[in-house]
Image: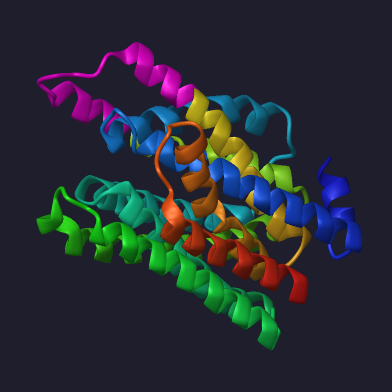
Amino acid sequence: MGATIVGLAGTPAGATLATALALLAALLHAVFGALQKGRHDPLMSRGAIDAAYGLMAAPVALFVVPWPEPHMWPIFAAAWVIHTGYKLATLASYRRGAFTVVYPVMRGTGPLFAVIGAWLIFGEVFQPLQWVGVAVLLTGLYGLAAYNMVHVTVDRDRLVPALWLAVLTGLFVAAYTTFDAYGIRATADPFTFLAWFFMIDGVVFPILAARAWVRMENRPTLGPLTARGLIGGLVAFASFGSIMLATRLDQVGQAAILRETSTVFAALIGWLVLGESVGPRRLTLMGLIAAGAVIVEAAG
């Protein structure tokens, strides 16, 4: 399988597959974000999810895929640092601000800096019309955040720090998108990077969550939390794996832009599954997000 992905890289078929994988990652990332900001404290959810995907990845990393080359260990160490910072910033933002406000800011900050990072690291250059698409997408994302912010009625006193933390999270998104794309290209088998990354990344937050759970007065029951972790772990495999394979097959910046249609999928899930109202203004802003992604893809 790894050889097939490597063989498709840089081909028209690889570009088509990369587009499909990036859109799949967007859909799954919306589901993953909702799982973290659900009935449980975000740290509890994150700890359960990380434990699940770390344990599931371990036998694959140890016994199925080829072991990493020696030069990969510093890359894994750096990736772990970046992802740990990302998760800490995400948790802090979710705890202080409404999901509908902070999530578009996180996702809006990430792609712009990911495109810049892809230019610096991989020499990727966006065409002028693609930059128009980026501007349209960011207008929709930040417009959606501003619209939701106006209508927030709870925790407004914590909204400003939540937004700054969301911006910081977006910077971490850009950092891990570009660095992980570098990492998955640095090993002969892309599935080696994915399996070992998930195993290593799944170590710390289960420990932090367990320590917090012990200190809680009203501890969440482990059954539903474990179920959330298992579902989230599977979603994380598919979501992160899809976007990483997309960056291996085609342009990093283009895949990063397409993934940010996750905000549209998040709103559609809320409307179709949860019965939440969308309204014409939010629908227009989501249309801008989708239109920006289409422009970037069509002009690429």
- Magenta region, mostly helix, strand or loop? helix
Q: Residue at x 81, y 52 (%)?
A: 17
Q: Residue at x 54, y 47 (%)?
A: 265
Q: In front: 281, or 123?
A: 281
> Eyeballing the image, is 28 above or below 257?
above
Residue 217 is left or right of residue 251, and the answer is left
> Eyeballing the image, is 111 above or below 162?
below
Residue 280 is left or right of residue 192, and the answer is left
> Where does the C terminus fall, quadrant-wise?
bottom right
Q: Residue 128's spot in the image, x, y percent?
A: 67, 88
Q: Please, which residue is most extreme toward the front here? A: 280
Tell me if residue 171 can be seen.
Answer: no
Q: How is the image coloured?
A: rainbow
> Where does the N terminus fall, quadrant-wise?
top right
Q: Residue at x 81, y 44 (%)?
A: 2
Asked if the stretch drawn in magenta spans residue 229, the answer is: yes
Residue 54 is left or right of residue 120, and the answer is left
Q: Residue 245's spot in the image, x, y percent?
A: 71, 51
Question: Which residues lie in the magenta part?
Answer: 206-230
Asked if the stretch drawn in magenta spans residue 13, the answer is: no
Q: In front: 46, or 201?
A: 46
Q: Residue at x 34, y 33 (%)?
A: 38
Q: Residue 170's spot in the image, x, y percent?
A: 41, 63
> Eyeballing the image, is 140 above or below 85?
below
Q: In front: 203, or 157?
A: 157
Q: Please, which residue is most extreme toward the bottom here? A: 128
- Label count reads 0
Q: Residue 165's spot in the image, x, y percent?
A: 27, 61
Q: Which quadrant of the figure has residue 24?
A: top right
Tell me if residue 139 can be seen.
Answer: yes
